[in-house]
Amino acid sequence: MNIRKMMDQKVINESNLASQFKDDNLQGFYKIVQQYDEYIYPIMKANGWKPILFGVRTVMFTFGDTSFSRRGYKKDGVWCYPVDNKLGLSHYERHSKGLMFQIAKLSTIVTYCQVVEIVQMMYNLVINHETVRKAVQQAHKLQVEFDEYRYYQDHAEQKKIKAPFLYIEGDGVMVKTTIGDNKRTDLAHFVIHIYFI
């Protein structure tokens, strides 16, 4: 009898369940934002920042398109939104860094149009190919910056060596070439010898 009752029940609608989980995630997000805003309030005031307004901001995260309220502070003509900084959001940024990372990663596998479709299906977020292009450009810029940083790390100034004796040996030669007006090129070769006693 119990088995028959179980078989007669309707199947749970997975999309309704996912929607409920999404609402729970958003409520958790709002709670985290509010807690951080309350935590940072006395710290900002102690550092001379004046709370001016509660601003609302709308941003797309991987867990949904959400609007949240946070305090804005002003000091010496400069505005600061600590909650935005905590979330890693730049001024006027409409998409979170986590979402942009996933969009850029997807673009390495499928076309921009397919990325738009996947994001719509997986996250129920509406983006366009321009958002995908922006994510790819940001990823490229970060990669270039990382490569430059790594280059300078590898070529950082070496610690200077103090040696009691230093010998520099040099030699030069002039060779015939087809380059230049005089058809001759000077080549130089130097060797440095460091002796520790």
Image: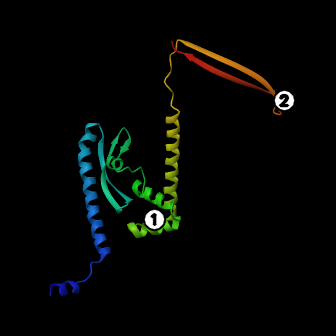
Above or below for 135 versus 119: above
Q: What colour scheme has been applied to the protein in the rendered image?
A: rainbow
Q: Quadrant of the N terminus?
A: bottom left
Above or below for 147 versus 29: above
Residue 96 visible somewhere in the drawing:
no
Q: Which mark is residue 28?
A: none
Element type at mark 1 = loop
Tell me which residue sits at (51%, 61%) in the image.
Answer: 130
Name the spot of residue 114 as percent of width and height, x first.
50, 68
Name the residue tied to disc 1.
Answer: 127
Tell me which residue sits at (29%, 77%) in the image.
Answer: 13
How far apart are the two marked residues, 2 and 1, measured between alpha carbons? 63 Å
The three-letter code of the residue at mark 2 reads Lys
The three-letter code of the residue at mark 1 reads Ile
Name the residue tied to disc 2.
Answer: 183
Name the spot of residue 115 as percent of width and height, x first.
48, 65
Element type at mark 2 = loop
Relative horizontal placement of residue 168, taking residue 35 as reference (left or right): right
146 or 1: which is nearer to us? Answer: 1
Q: Quadrant of residue 119?
A: bottom left
